[in-house]
Image (tube, grey):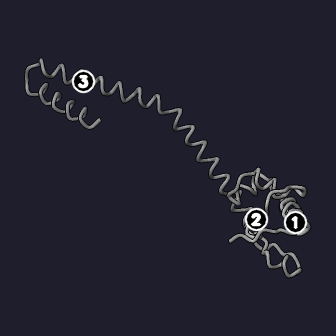
């Protein structure tokens, strides 16, 4: 069951808190939305002070957690501490960097696949030619190479 913030001033205050903490933490809406596993548009609506989109306390808690804050601190009016924020940001940046590296490698591999396929096709054609020559040739050497070529073709 979701506890929706029905008091407009309360919802507006949570929207302000979310926006201010995101900015203080140097997160763009896109990065924070990614970290919270939600669409950027949804986060933008949650931050919009005049938004009519319902905001649940569970969503507030999730966003605050992504920013490294405990919701209890705000509910009890205590001092804001952000013990997890720098670590979360560090991990997020590391994952982003790794993802970019993987995407780069995939692009590199994708570019080399056509030339690899071309080389495999040439190899197959060569093996077929060897097998065909061996069939019409006489002698055990030719038959041996024909057998090797047919075996290699079966493995390709």
Q: Is residue 70 above or below residue 130?
A: below
Mark 2 — residue?
63
Judged from the image, the secondary structure of the residue bearing numbered disc 1 is helix
Which image quarter holds the C terminus?
top left
Quadrant of residue 121 within the rendered picture: top left
Classify 10 Å Cα crowding around label 3: few (below 14), some (14-19), many (20 and above). some
Q: Which residue is mark 3?
A: 128
For the residues labelled 1 and 3, the Cα–Cα distance comes to 71 Å
Residue occupying the point 50% across, 33% down: 112
Q: Secondary structure at mark 3?
A: helix
Residue that label 1 marks: 17
Seen from the viewer's position, the closer of residues 86 and 144 is: 86
Q: Position of residue 65 (x, y in %)?
A: 74, 69
Front position among marks 1 and 3: 1
Q: Which is nearer the N-term, disc 2 or disc 1?
A: 1
Identified at 89% across, 80% down, the residue is 77
């Amino acid at each position: 069951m979701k506890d929706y913030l029905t008091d407009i001033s309360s919802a507006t205050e949570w929207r302000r808190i979310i926006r201010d903490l995101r900015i203080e933490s140097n997160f763009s809406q896109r990065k924070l939305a990614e970290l919270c596993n939600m669409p950027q548009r949804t986060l933008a609506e949650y931050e919009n002070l005049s938004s009519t989109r319902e905001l649940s306390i569970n969503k507030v808690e999730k966003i605050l957690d992504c920013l490294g804050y405990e919701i209890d601190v705000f509910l009890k009016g205590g001092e804001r501490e952000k013990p997890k924020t720098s670590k979360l940001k560090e991990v997020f940046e590391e994952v982003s960097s790794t993802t970019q590296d993987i995407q780069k490698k995939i692009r590199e591999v994708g570019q080399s696949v056509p030339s690899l396929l071309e080389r495999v096709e040439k190899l197959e054609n060569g093996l077929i030619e060897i097998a065909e020559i061996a069939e019409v040739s006489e002698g055990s050497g030719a038959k041996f190479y024909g057998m090797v070529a047919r075996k290699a073709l079966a493995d390709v």
